[in-house]
Amino acid sequence: MPLPFRHITSTKQFTREDTDAVLKVAEKMENVLAKGGSDLLKNKILAALFYEPSTRTRLSFETAMQRLGGQVITADGLQFSSMYKGETIEDTMMVVGQYADIIAMRHPEQGSADRAAAVCPVPFINAGDGPGQHPTQALLDLYTIRKERGSLDGLHIAMVGDLKFGRTVHSLSFLLGLYRDVRFTLIAPKELTMPPKVTSFFKEKNIVFAESENLEQGLGADVIYMTRVQKERFENKEEYERLKLKYVLKADHLRNRKITVLHPLPRVGEIATDVDPLPGAAYFRQVRNGVVMRMALLAMLLGKA
Ligand code: NCD
């Protein structure tokens, strides 16, 4: 089933039918990846435009494209780009759209993805727009949760850390909200609570959620989604220093519990390394799932799956 849209800027675009279709294609891509790849996207070019520091997301997109036999052109860092010379996002899309068959862009400004998609002559994927959205991460998170837990309906999800600036938790909340009886415990310091764009969505959809400042409140959940405090979004560096390690998940918290632990990475201390050997520590499996998910999305948007 082709997706009913050409660009991916936000997880709010997705219905449950859409996510189910994407999950199905991702599952098929597992076999392709296990074989080392295919030539499904031969002669296709992905432009990866990353105007904000990123290694893993860019590498994940590049790996996905190359595993499907496609090629990648990249531009890295605002200072090297023509945006530095004053070119608008719109013009950049018009130009890069003449080089590439599909564009993935990360940009520090919230809303930049919508501006890009509005004019982009080829399929466009938002790879993170400031504190806004990060839809491909949320889709790979969804895929990981289903794979680890067997299903999505009925789950209790705890989200921990910087829920204000963390775009991955915003995007993931909208997707999980499509499933039946999913409930949330949102754990954040009072300075970094989940913004109204997400909590009002929960209220509108009658989705059960509780807010707390206490990590212990999340330990009864099926899934605990840890996040990094987003240093780059703070104006006040002292506030960042004070909040950065407010929550540290340790193996001791997880004894005798069957919790799946996720993190979009990079972690900077929020999950102690003694959690890594536990069976529920799924954050490195999550990285591999990112490749199959991005293979699926690239193939679908290019009309090949
Ligand atoms: C996340 C991001 O960029 O929002 N990381 C990622 O996609 N690999 C999370 C983060 O940077 O904390």
Image (spheres, rainbow, N blue to C red):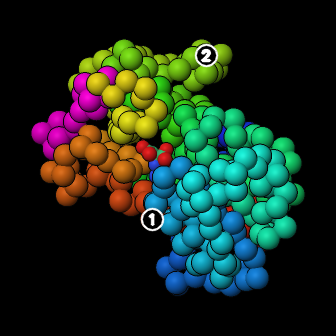
Which residue shows up at 58% across the image and 65% down it? 61
Viewer-closest of 76 and 264: 76
Type of the residue with mark 2? Ser
CA–CA distance between discs 1 and 2? Answer: 33 Å
Q: Relative to 255, say whether 104 is above or below.
A: below
Q: Secondary structure at mark 1?
A: helix
Q: Does 266 sit left or right of 249 as displayed?
A: right
**Residue 66 picture quarter:** bottom right
Residues packed near mark 2 inside 10 Å, few (<14), some (14 to 19) or many (20 plus): few
Q: Residue furthest left?
A: 252
Q: Is residue 141 above or below residue 29?
A: above
Residue stretch rendered in magenta on the structure? 239-255
**Earlier along the polypeptide chain: callout 1 or callout 2?**
2
Examine the rendering and report whether any part of residue 202 can be seen.
Answer: no
Q: Which mark is drawn over residue 200?
A: 2
Judged left or right of residue 257, residue 297 is right
Whether residue 251 appears in magenta in the rendering, the answer is yes
